[in-house]
Image: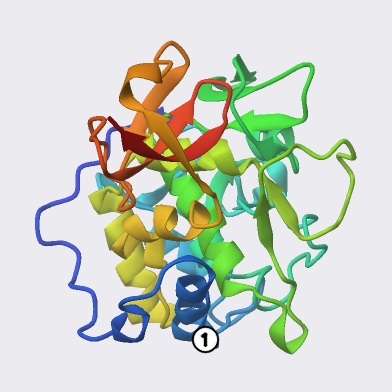
Amino acid sequence: MKVLLLLLLPLGCFAQIPQGYYDTAIGFTGDSLKTKLYQIVNNHVEFPYTSTSTDVWDILKETDKDTLNPNNVILLYSGWSVDAAQEYNGGSGWSREHVWAKSRGDFGTALGPGTDVHALRPCDVSVNSARNNRWFAECSTEYIDPDGATGSYTSSTAWVWKPRDEVKGDVARMIFYMATRYEGDNGEPDLEVINSIPSDNNMTLPYHALLSDLLQWHLDDPVSDWERNRNDIIYYDYQNNRNPYIDHPEFVTQIWTSSLSVEEVSSGTIESSELIKVVNLNGQESEVVVGEILIFIYSNGSIKKVLITE
């Protein structure tokens, strides 16, 4: 039976960020910060996708355990709670969702990008099939599975997928992690987040979209205790590396908006009708402040870095 549950984590259930873990990244922004983070989180302990020893199935039973029913796991795109022990069970159990679609870089289930639990989550089998390798972007047609409404969305006209509101920030931070951890070294793919939807849905180039919407989801759905706890389990019990964007959400805007040129905009000429959010360079929502560089996010998905003048 699949049950939608509100997860409650007891206070103090997650540990502290290891002292000094991010020290070498202090003072950097943009690509330099991304490189420093890569140097911190790479060379993690790798586990097989399927094995008689500890494998991805085993780890997900711990990282995504239902805190109200420890025999179950919570499914990413639907929030349903299902029996963890059944695993795939001939298609009647649950599957392992590659949040960064494994065809986007053609790495399959190879050690490293294909088995990195920071970007793998339990998922309903048919919901996983519906998501397929769709790009992440805003869309408005709720996906109704044979088992019921999921709260996730798709489109009949574009090859896109939107996770339910409770996890859209989680998904964004997993995508940003993958684009940081895998930089093309040692035979690994060089994964990049792009801000356009490719016309070829079947392309295997190592790109994932859509940057502007992922940035928006990251800001709309802040880091939760659930994510922090999951990050700790992966670090302390298995891979010995962390998702930096869970520990330091401000790193997202410091990296992925750094390449934008600064536009000077007079406070009296700001068009507010399409402006849906203003954040500072630390990713914190902000008022329009004269003399400060801010990030403007618009309803059409565009992003601008602006300096407000009198």
Residue occupying image coordinates x 62% and y 21%: 139
Does residue 308 show up?
A: yes
Residue projecting furthest to the left: 11
Instruction: Please tell me in which quadrant of the rendered image residue 152 appears.
Output: top right
Instruction: Please tell me in which quadrant of the rendered image residue 100 appears.
Output: bottom right
In the rendered view, would you say 154 is above or below 292? above
Residue occupying image coordinates x 46% and y 81%: 36
Whole-percent x and y of residue 203?
89, 49
Whole-percent x and y of residue 219?
37, 39
Q: Is residue 18 left or right of residue 298?
A: left
Instruction: Please tell me in which quadrant of the rendered image residue 216 appears.
Output: top left
* Foreground residue among 122 and 283: 283
Q: Secondary structure at mark 1?
A: loop
Residue occupying image coordinates x 51% and y 63%: 177
The residue beneath circle 1 is 45
* Foreground residue among 301 and 44: 301
Q: Is residue 154 left or right of residue 46?
A: right
Amino acid beneath label 1: Val
Whole-percent x and y of residue 267?
32, 25
Residue projecting furthest to the top: 273
Number of marks in the image?
Answer: 1
Does residue 4 show up?
A: no
